Image: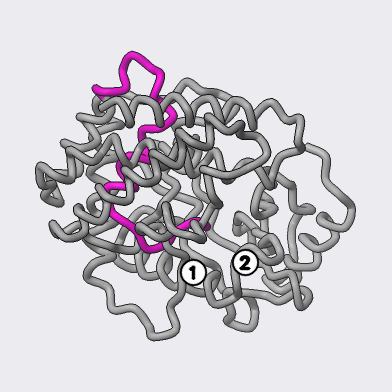
Amino acid sequence: MIVKPSIQRNAEKACLFWGGYVEPPKLIKHRENAVFDVTLIGNKRAALRLHRPGYKSQKEIESEIWWTKSLAKEGFPVPSPLSNKDGNYLVELSPELVATAIQWVDGKPIGKEEEPDLITGGKIDFELGRLIGQLHNITKNLSFPDWFSRPLWDIDGLLGEKPHWGKFWEGKHLNDSEKEIFNLVRKKALKILRHYKTQGGEILLIHADIIGENVFKNDTGISLIDFDDCGYGFPIYDLSTATIQSLDHPSYQKRCNLILEGYDTVRTLRPIDIELFPVFSMLRVLATSAWIIPRASPNNSKIEMYKNSAIKQAVKFLEN
């Protein structure tokens, strides 16, 4: 992975606030944030994050840290945030750039974007559903501070005038007929979700990005990482997001059933929740198709790939 000298310098500068490093930090991921693998002085391995300027406010980042720290205190398998020499969890490297550090998680992700085959199976899928249920149970019982702030993945966050990841029904990459399909989907989905909310559809702080690369497996079980997209939404969105990388796989429905069964052992699902599972899966696919547009070059093949996947799910939704 090619690392810009300025990013590397900022990473090394950030490490000094945590006491310095044994070896220079190594870039392992660069999307919204630049994430580095680093061993800090004292042989403490960590994931150092340089947060993309303008993507999240400091209050939102501090809120994510508060939540993951609270989850870790409750024994939930999540990497704990690391305080620096001054006892702070967030370092301001410049007015635009902040850094945080979290515990390193041993193990391997059950899937990666560039490797579509997931490490799945009855035990892992059931455990993942159960883990998501535990996440939601712990979260519901937490007392959040007044200053806590995270984005919305609710009806407005998915289908409103200013959706969190952008308007999937607009864009130069869409022709008129494709725009018409997505606008019909939006209209139908809005009606369904508004009804769901009147029927007790719960809004809760959720992870919102439980894809394969954010689920780590090791000898002791599985854990969740990367809470950067956490926000307030429907719990079923977390469950459906956990399966979208298997949408075209023969085992898709089996994965869905096992994850739902695992979840239901710790947190009861109602028939209406299960009924709307595929709707939220579709909405995640559509949201992702909007997410890629401002982040990819105009000729990037991923734009067409994500668009085609979104159209496929949209048409299926409209036909049901």
**Quadrant (top left/top right/bottom left/bottom right) for the N terminus:** top right
Whole-percent x, y for residue 249 in the image = 38, 17
Other residues around mark 2 within 10 Å, as few (<14) / some (14–19) / many (≥20) = many
Q: How many marks?
A: 2
> Residue 65: which numbered mark, if any?
1
- The residue furthest top is 250
For the point 66% across and 55% down, the residue is 33
Whole-percent x, y for residue 314 in the image = 40, 31
Residue 16 lies in what quarter of the image? bottom right
Whole-percent x, y for residue 146 in the image = 39, 85
Region of the chain picked out in magenta, as a range = 228-254
Mark 1 vs 2, N-terminal side: 1
Residue 210 lies in what quarter of the image? top left
Whole-percent x, y for residue 297 in the image = 76, 38
Q: Residue under circle 2?
A: 100
Asked if residue 241 is among those painted magenta in the image, a careful observer would answer yes
Left or right: 304 in relation to 189: right
Secondary structure of the residue carrying numbered label 2 = strand
Secondary structure of the residue carrying numbered label 1 = helix
